[in-house]
Image (spheres, rainbow, N blue to C red):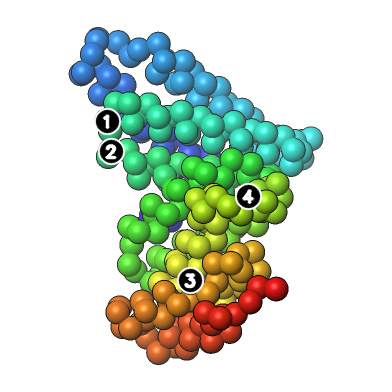
Amino acid sequence: MYIPTGELHVILTEIDGILNSCRTNETEMTSPSPGADLITLAQALEQLADVMTRVEGDIKSGGNTTAADITEIGAYALQLQEALAAACEKQSLPEQQQPLALLAINMALWIAQHSGQIELLEPVANAIALLANKSRDPADLGKLSGVISTIIDAVAPVISQDLEKMNAGRPWRVLLLNHSIVATRSHDTGLMEAAFALLTSNLPEDATRFFSEGMEQMEALDYPAHVRAVMQKYHSQWPANRSLH
């Protein structure tokens, strides 16, 4: 499984690949030239590429690009990723689902690696959920867990404060739950401990059910003993009758 790195040249290659698929499909299905919406989106993505390239050059030369600048550029980049995903959905291009997911994760990593904050989390959380289900290799999942940790650390406080507890599908919750799932599937107890600590501190209302279902999976999928031991420890700490108050 390819593990996202956040490198700019990878982001630009992914954008070009997805755009080319949209152009080819639109040409074959409708008219000899791309529609106005796709042309406008392509121009916006080209401008984004120029800005991100200039920013990297500025940072390398010791320029004055700030974390706030990266946050703003990153938010715009993820908005364009959503627009590109909508274009692919409109054209019925399901084969672009994984490239779009990788693009979202790489954009989030780029933000994190340049000290910005991720203010648009939904496409990133959904992308991680998709990628997590594409592999069963513990080594790959261990690397993916590290990617998720980097992204979690860069999530804007307005999101990580998690004020909308009633929304079960909120991206912050989806991200943390998938982080724990990926860490478990990696069979790395250190990654499990770190992910479970985040889960219990940020989503205590979900902990009991998560560890209960985790123990069921230990038996159903015959996890190694060292993995079961960590899951059992947290299951014992978060029994069904535990009060959060």
Q: Is residue 90 above or below residue 112?
A: above
- Point 33% across, 31% down: residue: 89
Between the C-alphas of marks 2 and 3, the distance is 31 Å
Is label 1 or label 3 in front?
3
Q: For mark 2, does the 10 Å Cα neighbourhood hold few (<14), some (14 to 19), or many (20 or more) residues?
A: few
Q: CA distance from mark 1 to mark 3?
A: 35 Å
**What residue is shown at x 50% (from left), y 68% (from top)?**
180
Which mark sits nearer the N-terminus, 1 or 3?
1
Residue at position x 40%, y 59% in the image: 132
* Residue 205 in the figure: left or right of residue 40: right
Residue underneath mark 4: 164
Q: Give the structural element (helix, strand or loop) at label 1.
A: loop
**Residue at screen point 20% across, 18% down:** 28
Question: Label 1 belongs to which residue?
Answer: 92
Q: Amino acid at mark 2?
A: Pro
Mark 3 vs 4, N-terminal side: 4
Label 2: state its secondary structure. Answer: helix
In which quadrant of the rendered image does the C terminus lie?
bottom right
Tell me the residue that label 3 is attached to: 210
Q: Is residue 26 visible?
A: yes
Where residue 33 appears, x then y in whole percent? 30, 10
Query: Considering the image in quadrants, where does the N terminus appear?
Result: bottom left
Residue topped by disc 2: 94
Nearer-N-terminus badge (1/4): 1
- The 10 Å Cα crowd at callout 4, few under 14, some 14 to 19, many 20 or more, is few
Does 41 appear above or below 188? above
